[in-house]
Image (cartoon, grey):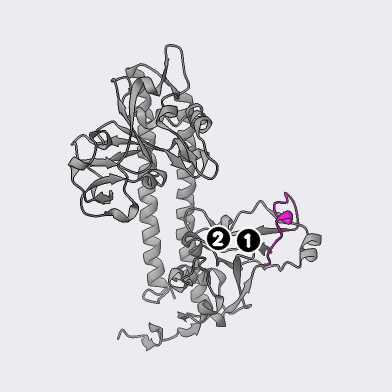
Amino acid sequence: MKKGYRKTDVGVIPEDWVAKQLGSLGKFRGGSGFPTKYQGDIEGDYPFFKVSDMNNEGNSTFMINSNNWISENTRKQIGANTFPANTIVFAKIGAAIFLERKKILSQESCIDNNMMGFVLDDGTAHHRFVHYLFLSIQLGKLVAATALPSLNGRDIAGLAYGIPKLPEQTAIAAVLSDADALIISLEKLITKKRNIKQGAMQELLMPKEGWVMKKLGEIFTFSGGYSASREQLSNDGFCYLHYGDIHGAKKTFINVKNEYTEIPKLKILLKNVSPKSLLSNGDIVFVDASEDDEGTSRHIVVKNTDGIPYISGLHTIVAKSKDNSLDNDFKRYCFQTKVVKSQFKFYAVGTKVSGISKANIAKIEIAIPSKAEQTRIATILTNMDTEIEVLKQKLAKYRMIKQGMMQELLTGKTRLI
């Protein structure tokens, strides 16, 4: 064993660290449960937070920004509890994405009944150190296996970890906070670049003199995909495009060759698939169903220069070019304008699920510049996308580095004091 370390029930830790249960550092308290009529005040004395406020990208931010407030009179009327600054908040009920979200409140606040707070005892531990300790826990393994999963504060309080003295906790928290600050600054830069690109795209694609208006039915032929469930997909077979992967995509194109290993596969004989459902280079795949109007315009442009068999799937509409009027790179952007999206929303039908038909997509109009201008526009926007992608890769790297730092510092493998 390395000098200066000892073996304990929680593993090997530095000799001057103490094995403690998390419950010894503070107490879990449940939320208050706000009646709907009190939620959403613009001004008030106390902000309150719901599970949905936790659903943002990343889990490194220390504060939740709430636009919902309640007054002191309302708080007293409904008997809501307040939580002091630096309370660590957990979403205890909901989808798995919420269960990993842990935040630190920035001021005295109230929380919803579907959340719980961990309030530290004064002077026992540094709140940000404990926050990072919670971030390192795989809470999903503690979630009750029911239709409505939930976290139990007693289960978390019983977990034991090596805890350093307060000065070292403070030093660890400071280093990890610096890493978070770098990550947050990069997240903000990416958001700024995306907004700039969005503005540039709307301006560049605004119809100008000499542009031609055409209905999509004049440019494309439309067909359906081959229906297969998610359960039928695996790593074996031919590439398959599930409509859920279009909804979940962060971009509007797919490079089949470069992304081959990540694309789900369907084991099937190709002779059983209609040629109309096999995706060629430049094909566009729209979804025919969405849970909201915004999703009705979701699509993927296929880059498949090598002709790799790629099957369009359930709830998809395949658009194959009739002519050569649209540049393939231009296709990645020309359906993202507000004008085109509003047409998708107009033709969408349904209540809980919005759907659009091949016949209605054919009615949608787009503005088409010359091929030379299409190329210029696509080049500008592609360069912007490339810059954003480089930043995203850097962000992923920084997040991995931070995870490695947490593993080293929170276990005492690397000492700061």
Q: In the picture, which quadrant includes the N terminus?
A: bottom left
Residue hosting label 1: 106
- Helix, strand, or loop for circle 1? loop
Q: Would you say residue 42 sits in the magenta stretch?
A: yes
Instruction: Look at label 2 and name its amino acid.
Output: Phe
Residue at the (75%, 55%) spot, across then down: 44
Q: Nearer the viewer, residue 328 or 201?
A: 328
Q: Is residue 241 left or right of residue 406?
A: left
Q: Is residue 407 left or right of residue 352?
A: left
Residue 376 image point, x, y percent? 35, 23
- Helix, strand, or loop for circle 2? loop
Residue at the (57%, 79%) spot, across then down: 25
Q: Would you say residue 333 sits in the magenta stretch?
A: no
| Distance of label 1 from label 2 (alpha carbons) | 8 Å
Marks 1,2: beta carbons within 8 A: yes
Q: Is residue 121 left or right of residue 315?
A: right
Question: In this rendering, is residue 235 above or below 23?
Answer: above
Q: Nearer the viewer, residue 342 or 376?
A: 342
- What kind of secondary structure does the magenta stretch mostly adopt? loop
Mark linked to residue 255: none
Question: Which of marks 2 and 1 precedes in the sequence?
Answer: 2
Q: In the picture, which quadrant includes the C terminus?
A: bottom left
**Magenta stretch bounds:** 32-46
Residue hosting label 2: 62
Residue at the (47%, 67%) spot, across then down: 135
Q: Quadrant of residue 359?
A: top left
Instruction: Look at label 1 and name its amino acid.
Output: Ser
